[in-house]
Amino acid sequence: MILKKIMEKRYKLLLIAAGSITAVIIIIFLLTNNQLPDSAGIIDKKYRITQQHYWSSLTTGYRFDNRAVETYFKNDIANNHTLDFFSYCQSRFKDMEYSEHMQAVRKYLHDTIQPPEKAEQIYELYGKYNEYQKELYLDQKRWAGSGTPEEMLENLRKIQDFRRQHFGENTADSIFGVEVKSNEYALRKQIIIGDTGMTGREKEERLASLRCNMWGDQAETVDDRQALLDRYNEKLKIHEADLAGMSKEDRERKISEFRRRIFTPEEAERMDNADRQLKYIRERDIEYSRLSRAILDNNDLSEQEKNRKIMELHNKLYGGSGKTP
């Protein structure tokens, strides 16, 4: 009896640890091996993962009141809500031994979901999910490594194959499909943007093709909720090599053009003004440094004359505020 309680306590701690570390393990697992991916999507398009699912995956999650739970599992028990719901169950009933935890989850499911057969199916799937997390946690060394975005993409495919073996293909793709497709899209974007062998225009064309291939008729709007500043920085990264090869004037003009495509005219103008102000300050500081050095190096001047000339130069460039460059 004592041994049983000890084992239950260990399993409970293992479950809590696994719940918190699973996401980290998955990220680490994506960094192993070195095989290049093929062009096929990891999740079959029959699952119809939409941009709304993608956007939801970028938020903090769902609310799980009783009515919401009943609605989320009205049809299939394995869907894009299942993963968040299981995390919610782990958190809601965390301060108890594992056997107590499972009993509490089972009671909660039967009190919340009808018919009882469906509640029991979700309970059984929840137990299988806990076993999956435990297996990840106990075999952490298997996932150690580092790699490129190409390698991470290949290993995203491999970890989904691991899930398919544990849950069955349809269940695994239904539960983890949104997460996998979202990560796959981000990695494929990163691969294209980081390709130093393409021009900015070629990258833009490849990205458009990627959006069309992965999101179909939603390709034009899938990135609409990306933060404007992130979109702007991404644009600069896409055209990084092109900008580096331009003259200073052409580069500034091109960057200003990007800003006007992404931000409002007022926001773009403020950014341009800030750049001009920084440019003015930088050039003024360089000029002060050059002229003050010439004064200090002039051996024909006394220390008193040098101090006077430095002060006059400072007042001329910075005004009489006493501010230092």
Image (tube, rainbow, N blue to C red):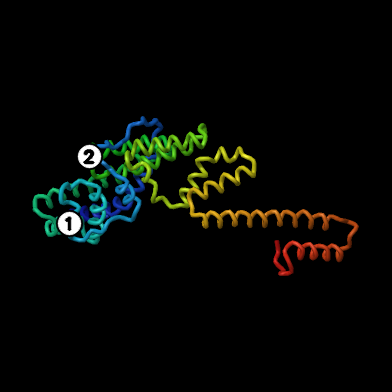
Residue drawn at 74 percent across, 61 percent down? 317
Question: Residue 303 in the image: x percent, y percent?
Answer: 86, 63
Which mark sits nearer the N-terminus, 1 or 2?
Answer: 1
User: Would you say 80 lies left or right of 257 here?
Assistant: left
Q: Amino acid at mark 1?
A: Val
Does the rendering let one see residue 29?
no
- Residue 136, image x and y in percent? 29, 44
Most extreme residue toward the front is 265
Q: Amino acid at mark 2?
A: His
Of 227 and 154, nearer the camera is 227
Q: Is residue 313 left or right of residue 7?
A: right
Q: Relative to residue 201, is residue 74 depicted above or below? A: below
- Label 2 residue SS: helix
Q: Which residue shows up at 60% across the image and 56% down it? A: 273
The structure residue drawn at horizontal position 89% and vertical position 62%, both measured from the top left corner, is: 302
Residue 110 visible somewhere in the drawing: yes
Q: Residue at horizontal 63%, vertical 54%?
A: 276
- Would residue 266 be found to the left or right of residue 173 on screen? right
How many residues crowd mark 1 within 10 Å: few (<14), some (14–19), many (20+)? many
According to the picture, the residue beneath numbered tag 1 turns out to be: 105
**Residue 166: numbered disc:** 2
Q: Position of residue 24 (x, y in %)?
A: 36, 48
Q: Which of the two residues, 50 or 42, is positioned nearer the viewer here?
A: 50
The one nearer the camera, 251 or 183, is 251
Mark 1 to mark 2: distance in Å? 21 Å
Crowding near the residue tagged with mark 2, few <14, some 14–19, many ≥20 C-alpha atoms within 10 Å: some
Residue extending furthest toward the bottom: 321
